[in-house]
Image (tube, rainbow, N blue to C red):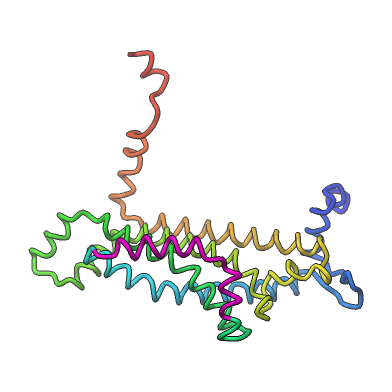
């Protein structure tokens, strides 16, 4: 095993950093190993989950209602564009000036990062619900709240979870900037090379990448699980409709 890791060079050393403690670059301190990275990882996930939960609580109800009344095109588009345009580091610096260092600052930045995909995907999901279905529900005497809760929300769940998936990946990946606000996440080894060195940076980056992929996979499975069976049955037909002609079809022509 050690021979294989040695053959991998810096990448192998980064993997060893994840599992084994070593002396810091500056000396006098033990760094790396599962206990330290697990502590960083726990904080990393705490701020990420808190930010995602707050963003979902704020964005999803608003986007559901805007989608229901059909007056949120500008909000959905503008929010999505702003979310892509504003750098996370700039937001962090802004909140440091007004909120100070600590968890509140980091979570506020991550909430603002998570909101745009949630608003956009939720709004689009509601607007894609068949209007005839909504009109039929209204004709049966359902109130607007009942239509949102019993018709539009269930049918928009796949799109909503798609937004949650995007937001979760963005938040987990961006939580590496938290040490700049004195919150020790997995970004600590990445932004302090004077202590952890290049190997520590690479090792922490590997852990962040693995966690991000795991989060993406988990939300992909959840998105699939909440998709109504009728929509799942339509997917193969859609794939056939947009697929390229097969060789046999070309020959028959």
Q: Residue at x 87, y 71 (%)?
A: 24
Which residue is at the front of the view, 144 or 179? 179
| Relative horizontal placement of residue 35, taking residue 21 as reference (left or right) | left
Q: Main secondary structure of the magenta part?
A: helix
| Relative horizontal placement of residue 103, taking residue 138 as reference (left or right) | right
Please identify the quarter of the rendering in which residue 156 is found: bottom left
Please identify the quarter of the rendering in which residue 153 is found: bottom left
179 in magenta: no
82 in magenta: yes
Residue 127, horizontal then vertical, whole percent: 26, 58
Count of labels in the image: 0
Vertical order, 128 against 122 (above or below): above
| Relative horizontal placement of residue 212, taking residue 123 as reference (left or right) | right
Q: Residue at x 16, y 57 (%)?
A: 133
Residue 31, horizontal then vertical, whole percent: 82, 72
Q: Residue at x 49, y 64 (%)?
A: 167
Residue 106, horizontal then vertical, whole percent: 58, 77
User: Magenta region: which residues?
Assistant: 71-95
Which residue is at the front of the view, 179 or 130? 179
Which residue is at the front of the view, 198 or 38? 198
| Relative horizontal placement of residue 206, taking residue 200 as reference (left or right) | left
Quadrant in which the C terminus appears: top left
Residue 67, horizontal then vertical, whole percent: 27, 64
Q: Which residue is drawn at 36% across and 70% down?
A: 60
């Amino acid at each position: 095993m050690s021979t294989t890791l040695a053959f991998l060079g810096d990448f192998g050393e980064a993997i060893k950093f994840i599992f084994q403690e070593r002396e810091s670059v500056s000396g006098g301190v033990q760094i790396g190993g599962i206990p330290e990275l697990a502590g960083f990882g726990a904080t990393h996930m705490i701020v990420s989950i808190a930010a995602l939960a707050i963003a979902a609580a704020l964005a999803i109800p608003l986007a559901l209602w805007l989608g229901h009344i059909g007056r949120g095109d500008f909000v959905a588009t503008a929010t999505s564009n702003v979310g892509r345009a504003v750098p996370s580091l700039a937001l962090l610096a802004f909140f440091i000036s007004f909120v100070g260092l600590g968890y509140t600052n980091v979570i506020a930045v991550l909430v603002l990062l998570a909101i745009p995909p949630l608003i956009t995907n939720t709004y689009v999901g509601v607007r894609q619900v068949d209007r005839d279905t909504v009109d039929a529900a209204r004709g049966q005497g359902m109130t607007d709240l009942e239509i949102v809760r019993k018709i539009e929300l269930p049918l928009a769940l796949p799109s909503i979870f798609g937004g949650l998936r995007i937001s979760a990946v963005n938040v987990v990946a961006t939580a590496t900037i938290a040490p700049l606000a004195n919150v020790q996440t997995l970004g600590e080894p990445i932004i302090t090379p004077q202590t952890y060195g290049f190997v520590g940076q690479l090792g922490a980056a590997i852990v962040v990448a693995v966690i991000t992929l795991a989060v993406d996979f988990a939300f992909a499975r959840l998105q699939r699980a909440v998709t109504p069976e009728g929509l799942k049955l339509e997917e193969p037909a859609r794939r056939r409709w947009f697929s390229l002609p097969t060789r046999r079809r070309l020959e028959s022509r």
